[in-house]
Amino acid sequence: MSNDLISCLQRHLDKNTKLPLYQQFVDIIKKQITIGILKKGDFLPSEREFTEQLDISRITIRKALAQLENESVIVRTRGYGTYVKGSFEYSLKTLKGFSQQIHIRGQKPNTIWVNKQLIKASPEVAKYLNICSDEDVFMLKRIRYIDDYPVSIEESFVPKTLIDNIDDIQLSLYSFFHSRNIIPMHAKNWVCASMPDEEFKQVMALKELVPVLVIKQQVFDENNNPIEYSINHCRSDMYVFTSEE
């Protein structure tokens, strides 16, 4: 994406016209978004890359980026970089899983498993799964991606009785549930802000302390039995959580 954008700017920026270069830059970026080449969440090259590849001053680049930011076209952060504005709206009301919600929006989900193992339930996990402390539960930890960008680290805890073979769970836990006729029916959610730990900063390539959203969810089946308790640490700049009555 970065190389394609640079090539486009190299072709269309004209130093011989009366229209200022910064305004040409702004117009080209907007057009790339309008025609779908640049999509929300796409990261732009750095100021230095723009300056070196386009052979124009950093002052010009900064002026163009400032205008795009003022017009709410892009977001500039010291920790994440500069990206096309737009957050992934994740519904807390529906019980569609992460992968399904991403597919519905025409984006590409991906999951990298960090760990799938049997552990002893902590008091917190035991409380929300309605089991005894130190009872066996499966812990599923994964990194979530949207269009190849890491957006969250999620831990799910599932009663041991619901999973025969942990390797049967591939991309989606909810697809596994449905394959076993386990139907998620409703959920309780808790949302708070926190500061990222070292693991989160490393996975998300954060250079500074940036708040994250922590989403805790308790999911129930049709018999009102808890089937999952999850703790999801999300990039606050990439998520908007919705809940409609």
Image (spheres, rainbow, N blue to C red):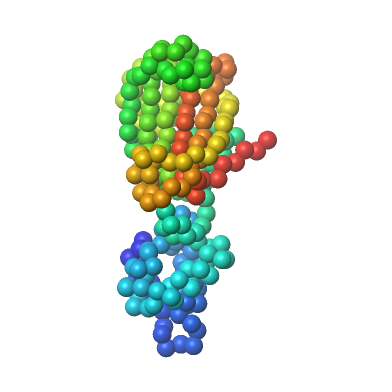
Residue 178 location in percent, x, y?
A: 46, 25
In the figure, residue 45 lies in which quadrant? bottom left
Q: Residue at x 49, y 39 (%)?
A: 194
The image shows residue 226, relative to residue 18, as above or below, that is above
Q: Which image quadrant for residue 187?
A: top right
Res 100 seen here: no
Q: Residue at x 43, y 57 (%)?
A: 78
In the rendered image, residue 14, in percent from the top left (x then y), is placed at 41, 83
Quadrant in which residue 58 is drawn: bottom left
Residue drawn at point x = 37 percent, y = 70 percent: 50
Q: Quadrant of the N terminus?
A: bottom left
Depth check: give the residue in front, 130 or 39.
130
Residue closest to the eye, 184 or 21: 21
Quadrant assignment for the C terminus: top right
Confirm whether residue 53 shows in the render: yes
Figure label count: 0
- Drawn side of residue 3 relative to residue 194, left or right: left
Residue shown at 38% from the left, 44% from the top: 201
Q: Give the residue furthest to the right.
A: 245
In the rendered image, residue 123, in percent from the top left (x then y), is placed at 47, 17
User: In the rendered view, would you say 114 is above or below 209?
Assistant: above
Locate residue 161, reporting x and y percent.
41, 14
